[in-house]
Image (cartoon, grey):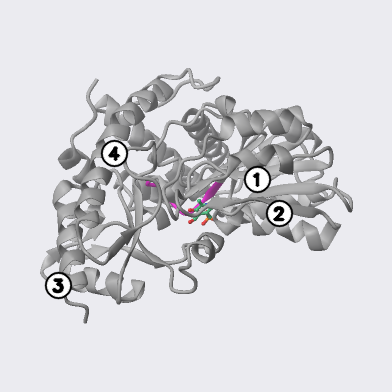
Amino acid sequence: MALATTDQIRSRFPALRRTHGSNPVAYFDGPGGTQVPGEVPVAMADYLFNRNANAHWAFPTSAETERVRHQAREAMADLLSARADEIVFGPNMTTLTYQLSRALGREMSPGDEIIVTELDHHANVDPWRALAVERGVAIRTIPLIPETGTLDLERFPELLGPRTRLVALGAASNALGTLTDVAPVARMAREAGARVFIDAVHLAPHRRIRVGEFHCDFLACSPYKFYGPHMGVLWLRSELLEGLDVPKLEPAPNEGPERFESGTVSAEGMAGTAAAVDFLASLAAGGGSKGEHHHGGSSPRAALLDELFSALVPREGALLERLWDGLSSIPGVRLYGPPPTEDRAPTLSFTVEGVSPRDVSSRLADEWGAFLSHGDFYAATVMRRLGRHPDGMVRAGISIYTTPEEVDRVVEGVGIIAGRPA
Ligand SMILES: Cc1ncc(COP(=O)(O)O)c(C=O)c1O
């Protein structure tokens, strides 16, 4: 079955009607947060206008709130090929990761070890590093190979030891677009008795995720990076959920995902998250099909998500290649991360000789209507290793609504900026 055309997809995003100066806005800031299709705020408004309540009470709006929350867990279960009772919601990935690090840290003692990487967003580094101060845990680091933008995974076996308690690894780099084959690393770590945390924030908008195939214990992502609202999601194995020493309030539920959700989670955000997953599935269906059950990705919605991602990967890949080829032909432009011949995310960071990333970004916005992020993208170690600290890079993120014309506009703009630095 064919994926909806880019025009059909674009018609569902109200933000794409925005103009800046004389240009329609081209949003290349997806790695920092994507635009939302109309269904997402509609679902959130429907919740707030018609069902707004807290859960666990004996009246209809409370029952409807519980249903909304459950449906959001089912939707995320389909997206991650997991079980609904293993899906935890929170304000964002960083907060959930800090909370998990507190829970896991309670089981750690001085001399225990955690392995992090130089390639990761610091949301998957600093919560673990905090345990060095709090629990006396030793932090070991998988190095980045600056020339390739990939991790030096050959170093991993020597970093792994009998005291390794956790390995924290990113599946896709939000700075360089690198994909890391996490499964063999996770398998080796778990065989050695360590737990494995995967940051899939940058992977979720671009690849079909099947948590079972990653062999990890925990996986986090953020719906606002895949066309949903600002929220974070953590998947964890159900046997761990029951056993973890989670910091929580005394009367809060002690079973299921709510055990991990301290306080009242945004139910409107959960409604919007479910709408974002349904939106993605509808692109393969040509309609808004909803999941009916949720065991290991076997619902109709999960099957549609399979189709969506298998059609989306080559489409986004072709746009990335067009962008790479265009930018690499401009003198003075330097591209980072793996070339498009590698399996990589469609996120391309670059610099222009003699022009600061901030100036490149602001000129692209003002003169070409192209919104590109600049800076370190919280991947500060990557920037240090690549000699780009503190200014960072400019980042072009291809999203589901990106067109070849928009890519060409960025290439034209960068060509002019590189040729005539202001
Ligand atoms: C790869 C990656 N990990 C983690 C995060 C942090 O996510 P959140 O903003 O949900 O805390 C981001 C956000 O940019 C990211 O790109």
For mark 2, give the secondary structure. helix
Whether the residues at callouts 3 and 2 have beta carbons within 8 Å, the answer is no
Can residue 40 be found in the magenta stretch?
no
In-image side of 63 versus 359 (left or right): right
Residue 327 image offset from top left, x and y in percent: 23, 56
- Mark 3: which amino acid? Gly
Read off the residue under disc 3: 21
Q: CA distance from mark 4 to mark 2?
A: 33 Å
Could you tell me how far apart the alpha carbons at marks 1 and 2 are, in whole angstroms?
8 Å
Q: Quadrant of residue 318?
A: top left
Q: Which label lies toward us, 3 or 2?
A: 2
Marked residue nearer the N-terminal end (4 or 1):
1
| Helix, strand or loop for disc 1 | strand
Location of mark 2 (residue): 128
1 and 3 marks in contact (CB < 8 Å): no
The amino acid at mark 4 is Gly
Query: In the rendered image of this protein, does residue 333 appear above or below residue 289?
Result: below
> Sequence order check: which comes first, mark 1 or mark 2?
2
Closer to the N terminus: mark 3 or mark 4?
A: 3
Q: Nearer the viewer, mark 3 or mark 4?
A: 4
Q: Is residue 402 above or below residue 365?
A: above
Residue 288 seen in the figure: no
Q: Are marks 1 and 2 in contact (CB under 8 Å)?
A: yes
* Residue named by callout 4: 317
> Badge 4, how many Cα within 10 Å: few under 14, some, many 20+?
many
Q: Position of residue 195 (x, y in %)?
A: 73, 37
Q: Which residue is tagged 1?
A: 168
Query: Which span of residues is magenta-colored?
Result: 227-232
Sequence-first tag of 3 and 2: 3
Instruction: Give amino acid for label 2.
Output: Trp
